[in-house]
Protein backbone atom coordinates (compact mmCIF):
# COMPACT_ATOMS: atom_id res chain seq x y z
CA UNK A 1 0.00 0.00 0.00
CA UNK A 2 1.34 3.42 -1.00
CA UNK A 3 0.26 4.98 2.28
CA UNK A 4 2.09 2.40 4.42
CA UNK A 5 5.30 3.01 2.47
CA UNK A 6 4.89 6.76 3.04
CA UNK A 7 4.95 6.48 6.85
CA UNK A 8 8.22 7.48 8.52
CA UNK A 9 11.22 5.32 7.47
CA UNK A 10 11.85 1.52 7.21
CA UNK A 11 13.09 1.09 10.82
CA UNK A 12 9.89 2.62 12.20
CA UNK A 13 7.72 0.85 9.62
CA UNK A 14 9.07 -2.49 10.85
CA UNK A 15 8.14 -1.69 14.46
CA UNK A 16 4.92 0.30 14.09
CA UNK A 17 1.36 -0.95 13.65
CA UNK A 18 -1.51 0.06 11.41
CA UNK A 19 -3.65 0.51 14.52
CA UNK A 20 -1.15 2.99 15.91
CA UNK A 21 -1.39 5.06 12.75
CA UNK A 22 -5.20 4.93 12.82
CA UNK A 23 -5.18 6.20 16.42
CA UNK A 24 -2.53 8.88 15.84
CA UNK A 25 -3.26 12.08 17.74
CA UNK A 26 -3.69 15.38 15.93
CA UNK A 27 -0.70 17.70 15.72
CA UNK A 28 -0.06 21.46 15.72
CA UNK A 29 3.10 23.47 15.17
CA UNK A 30 2.31 25.56 18.25
CA UNK A 31 1.41 22.59 20.47
CA UNK A 32 4.06 19.98 19.62
CA UNK A 33 6.81 21.97 21.33
CA UNK A 34 8.51 21.85 24.71
CA UNK A 35 6.63 23.01 27.78
CA UNK A 36 9.09 25.87 28.10
CA UNK A 37 8.44 27.00 24.52
CA UNK A 38 4.67 26.82 25.02
CA UNK A 39 4.90 28.91 28.21
CA UNK A 40 5.34 32.01 26.05
CA UNK A 41 1.84 31.53 24.60
CA UNK A 42 -1.63 31.32 26.16
CA UNK A 43 -2.58 27.76 27.10
CA UNK A 44 -4.36 26.27 24.09
CA UNK A 45 -7.32 23.89 23.92
CA UNK A 46 -5.02 20.94 23.21
CA UNK A 47 -3.05 21.64 26.39
CA UNK A 48 -6.18 22.10 28.51
CA UNK A 49 -6.66 25.82 28.00
CA UNK A 50 -9.40 27.91 26.42
CA UNK A 51 -7.83 29.41 23.28
CA UNK A 52 -6.53 28.36 19.88
CA UNK A 53 -3.20 30.06 19.21
CA UNK A 54 -3.49 29.43 15.46
CA UNK A 55 -7.02 30.68 14.78
CA UNK A 56 -7.68 33.65 17.02
CA UNK A 57 -11.07 33.91 18.73
CA UNK A 58 -11.92 30.34 17.72
CA UNK A 59 -14.05 28.23 20.05
CA UNK A 60 -12.26 24.97 19.17
CA UNK A 61 -8.89 23.35 18.60
CA UNK A 62 -7.64 23.34 14.99
CA UNK A 63 -4.81 20.82 15.38
CA UNK A 64 -4.40 18.77 12.22
CA UNK A 65 -4.74 15.05 11.47
CA UNK A 66 -1.67 13.68 9.63
CA UNK A 67 -1.90 9.87 9.60
CA UNK A 68 -1.13 8.49 6.12
CA UNK A 69 -2.48 4.93 6.43
CA UNK A 70 -5.68 6.06 8.14
CA UNK A 71 -6.47 8.41 5.27
CA UNK A 72 -6.08 5.58 2.74
CA UNK A 73 -8.23 3.24 4.86
CA UNK A 74 -11.04 5.79 4.97
CA UNK A 75 -10.96 5.91 1.16
CA UNK A 76 -11.26 2.09 1.17
CA UNK A 77 -14.38 2.26 3.40
CA UNK A 78 -12.62 0.39 6.20
CA UNK A 79 -14.27 -0.45 9.51
CA UNK A 80 -12.69 -0.76 12.96
CA UNK A 81 -13.50 -3.09 15.85
CA UNK A 82 -13.22 -1.53 19.30
CA UNK A 83 -13.12 -3.88 22.30
CA UNK A 84 -13.43 -3.43 26.06
CA UNK A 85 -14.26 -5.74 28.97
CA UNK A 86 -18.01 -5.16 28.67
CA UNK A 87 -18.21 -5.87 24.94
CA UNK A 88 -17.23 -4.66 21.51
CA UNK A 89 -18.49 -2.38 18.77
CA UNK A 90 -17.75 -1.83 15.09
CA UNK A 91 -17.61 1.56 13.40
CA UNK A 92 -16.94 2.74 9.86
CA UNK A 93 -13.49 4.30 10.10
CA UNK A 94 -14.79 7.63 8.80
CA UNK A 95 -17.14 7.74 11.82
CA UNK A 96 -14.31 6.82 14.20
CA UNK A 97 -12.98 10.36 13.76
CA UNK A 98 -14.71 13.27 15.44
CA UNK A 99 -13.29 16.19 13.46
CA UNK A 100 -12.28 17.75 16.80
CA UNK A 101 -8.62 18.58 17.24
CA UNK A 102 -8.65 18.20 21.02
CA UNK A 103 -10.19 14.69 20.98
CA UNK A 104 -9.87 13.42 17.39
CA UNK A 105 -11.34 9.91 17.72
CA UNK A 106 -14.10 8.03 19.52
CA UNK A 107 -11.89 5.51 21.31
CA UNK A 108 -12.99 5.32 24.94
CA UNK A 109 -10.34 5.16 27.70
CA UNK A 110 -11.28 1.53 28.43
CA UNK A 111 -11.24 0.39 24.79
CA UNK A 112 -8.56 -0.92 22.46
CA UNK A 113 -8.62 -1.06 18.68
CA UNK A 114 -8.71 -4.79 18.04
CA UNK A 115 -9.24 -5.06 14.30
CA UNK A 116 -9.52 -3.29 10.96
CA UNK A 117 -11.65 -4.68 8.14
CA UNK A 118 -11.51 -3.54 4.51
CA UNK A 119 -14.44 -4.77 2.39
CA UNK A 120 -13.41 -6.60 -0.79
CA UNK A 121 -13.95 -4.72 -4.05
CA UNK A 122 -17.07 -5.48 -6.09
CA UNK A 123 -15.57 -4.09 -9.30
CA UNK A 124 -12.09 -3.68 -10.78
CA UNK A 125 -10.47 -1.09 -8.55
CA UNK A 126 -7.42 1.17 -8.58
CA UNK A 127 -6.02 2.70 -5.39
CA UNK A 128 -3.32 5.26 -4.72
CA UNK A 129 -1.99 7.57 -2.01
CA UNK A 130 0.08 10.67 -2.80
CA UNK A 131 1.88 12.68 -0.15
CA UNK A 132 3.69 16.00 0.03
CA UNK A 133 6.08 16.42 2.95
CA UNK A 134 9.12 18.57 3.67
CA UNK A 135 11.40 15.52 3.90
CA UNK A 136 11.26 12.22 2.06
CA UNK A 137 11.29 10.19 5.30
CA UNK A 138 10.54 10.62 9.00
CA UNK A 139 8.06 13.37 8.30
CA UNK A 140 4.34 13.91 8.60
CA UNK A 141 2.45 14.96 5.48
CA UNK A 142 1.81 18.60 4.76
CA UNK A 143 -0.89 17.33 2.39
CA UNK A 144 -1.98 13.80 1.50
CA UNK A 145 -4.50 12.47 -1.01
CA UNK A 146 -6.00 8.97 -1.11
CA UNK A 147 -8.02 7.99 -4.17
CA UNK A 148 -9.99 4.82 -4.95
CA UNK A 149 -11.61 4.37 -8.35
CA UNK A 150 -13.68 1.31 -9.32
CA UNK A 151 -14.69 0.56 -12.92
CA UNK A 152 -17.35 -1.61 -14.53
CA UNK A 153 -16.71 -3.66 -17.69
CA UNK A 154 -17.53 -0.64 -19.88
CA UNK A 155 -14.90 1.51 -18.17
CA UNK A 156 -17.42 3.67 -16.32
CA UNK A 157 -16.70 4.64 -12.73
CA UNK A 158 -18.87 2.76 -10.23
CA UNK A 159 -16.89 3.62 -7.11
CA UNK A 160 -15.11 6.91 -6.52
CA UNK A 161 -13.63 7.94 -3.18
CA UNK A 162 -11.21 10.80 -2.61
CA UNK A 163 -9.96 11.63 0.88
CA UNK A 164 -7.52 14.42 1.71
CA UNK A 165 -5.17 14.40 4.65
CA UNK A 166 -3.43 17.04 6.81
CA UNK A 167 -5.84 19.89 6.06
CA UNK A 168 -8.30 19.44 8.95
CA UNK A 169 -8.70 17.66 12.28
CA UNK A 170 -9.75 14.37 10.62
CA UNK A 171 -9.40 12.72 7.21
CA UNK A 172 -11.61 14.80 4.91
CA UNK A 173 -13.83 12.69 2.65
CA UNK A 174 -14.74 14.65 -0.50
CA UNK A 175 -18.23 13.39 -1.25
CA UNK A 176 -18.80 16.05 -3.92
CA UNK A 177 -15.72 14.89 -5.82
CA UNK A 178 -16.73 11.24 -5.51
CA UNK A 179 -20.24 12.02 -6.78
CA UNK A 180 -18.79 13.92 -9.73
CA UNK A 181 -16.83 10.85 -10.82
CA UNK A 182 -19.70 8.38 -10.64
CA UNK A 183 -20.97 7.00 -13.94
CA UNK A 184 -18.31 8.74 -16.02
CA UNK A 185 -15.13 7.74 -17.79
CA UNK A 186 -11.95 9.24 -16.42
CA UNK A 187 -10.35 11.82 -18.71
CA UNK A 188 -8.34 15.02 -18.39
CA UNK A 189 -11.40 17.27 -18.24
CA UNK A 190 -13.00 15.23 -15.46
CA UNK A 191 -9.72 15.13 -13.55
CA UNK A 192 -9.43 18.92 -13.76
CA UNK A 193 -12.98 19.41 -12.42
CA UNK A 194 -12.39 16.94 -9.58
CA UNK A 195 -9.12 18.60 -8.59
CA UNK A 196 -10.88 21.97 -8.54
CA UNK A 197 -13.59 20.64 -6.22
CA UNK A 198 -10.92 19.29 -3.88
CA UNK A 199 -9.16 22.67 -3.89
CA UNK A 200 -12.38 24.45 -2.97
CA UNK A 201 -13.12 21.97 -0.14
CA UNK A 202 -9.71 22.31 1.55
CA UNK A 203 -9.38 24.96 4.25
CA UNK A 204 -6.03 24.43 6.01
CA UNK A 205 -4.83 26.78 8.73
CA UNK A 206 -1.34 27.90 9.67
CA UNK A 207 -0.35 25.02 11.97
CA UNK A 208 2.24 23.03 9.98
CA UNK A 209 5.58 23.84 8.37
CA UNK A 210 4.13 25.30 5.16
CA UNK A 211 1.62 28.07 4.52
CA UNK A 212 -2.12 27.36 4.31
CA UNK A 213 -2.30 28.76 0.77
CA UNK A 214 0.51 26.51 -0.43
CA UNK A 215 -1.09 23.45 1.15
CA UNK A 216 -4.44 24.34 -0.43
CA UNK A 217 -2.79 24.56 -3.86
CA UNK A 218 -1.02 21.24 -3.26
CA UNK A 219 -4.38 19.55 -2.66
CA UNK A 220 -5.31 20.39 -6.23
CA UNK A 221 -1.92 19.27 -7.52
CA UNK A 222 -1.99 15.93 -5.70
CA UNK A 223 -5.57 15.08 -6.63
CA UNK A 224 -4.76 15.77 -10.27
CA UNK A 225 -1.52 13.78 -10.09
CA UNK A 226 -3.20 10.84 -8.39
CA UNK A 227 -6.03 10.57 -10.92
CA UNK A 228 -3.67 11.02 -13.87
CA UNK A 229 -1.74 7.98 -12.65
CA UNK A 230 -4.95 5.97 -13.10
CA UNK A 231 -5.17 6.97 -16.76
CA UNK A 232 -1.91 5.18 -17.51
CA UNK A 233 -2.94 1.91 -15.81
Image (cartoon, rainbow, N blue to C red):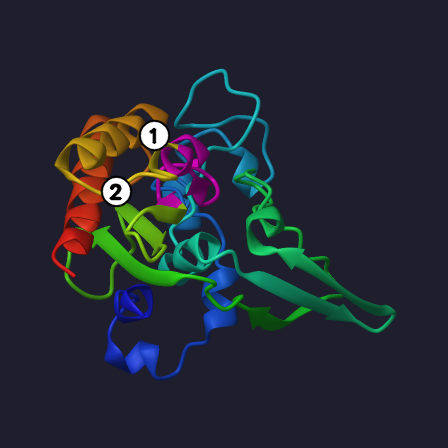
In the picture, the disc for residue 185 is: 2
Q: Residue at x 45, y 35 (%)?
A: 175
- The answer to whether the residue labelled 2 contacts the one labelled 1, judged by CB atoms less than 8 Å apart, is no
For marks 2 and 1, the one nearer the N-term is: 2
- Is any atom of residue 210 visible in this view? no
Spot occupied by residue 94 in the image (x, y as percentages of width and height):
55, 49
Q: What kind of element bears circle 1?
A: loop
Where is residue 126? Give x, y as percent. 30, 60
Q: Residue furthest top?
A: 57
User: Which quadrant would residue 196 be assigned to in this image?
Assistant: top left
Label of residue 219 in the image: none
Q: Which mark is residue 202?
A: 1
How many residues crowd around disc 1 within 10 Å: few (fewer than 14), some, or many (20 or more)? Answer: many
Residue 93 vertical position relative to residue 187 in the rendered view, above or below? below
The image shows residue 189 at horizontal and vertical percentages of 16, 31
Q: Rate crowding at label 2 as few (under 14), some (14 to 19) or many (20 or more) other CA atoms within 10 Å.
A: some
Amino acid sequence: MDAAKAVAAPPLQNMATVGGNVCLDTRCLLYNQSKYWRSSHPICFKAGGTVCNVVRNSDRCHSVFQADVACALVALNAKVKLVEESGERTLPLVEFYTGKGKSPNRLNPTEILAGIWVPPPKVHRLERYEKFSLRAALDFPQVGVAAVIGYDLDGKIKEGNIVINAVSSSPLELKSAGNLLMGKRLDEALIEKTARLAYEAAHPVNNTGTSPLYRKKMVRVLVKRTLERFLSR
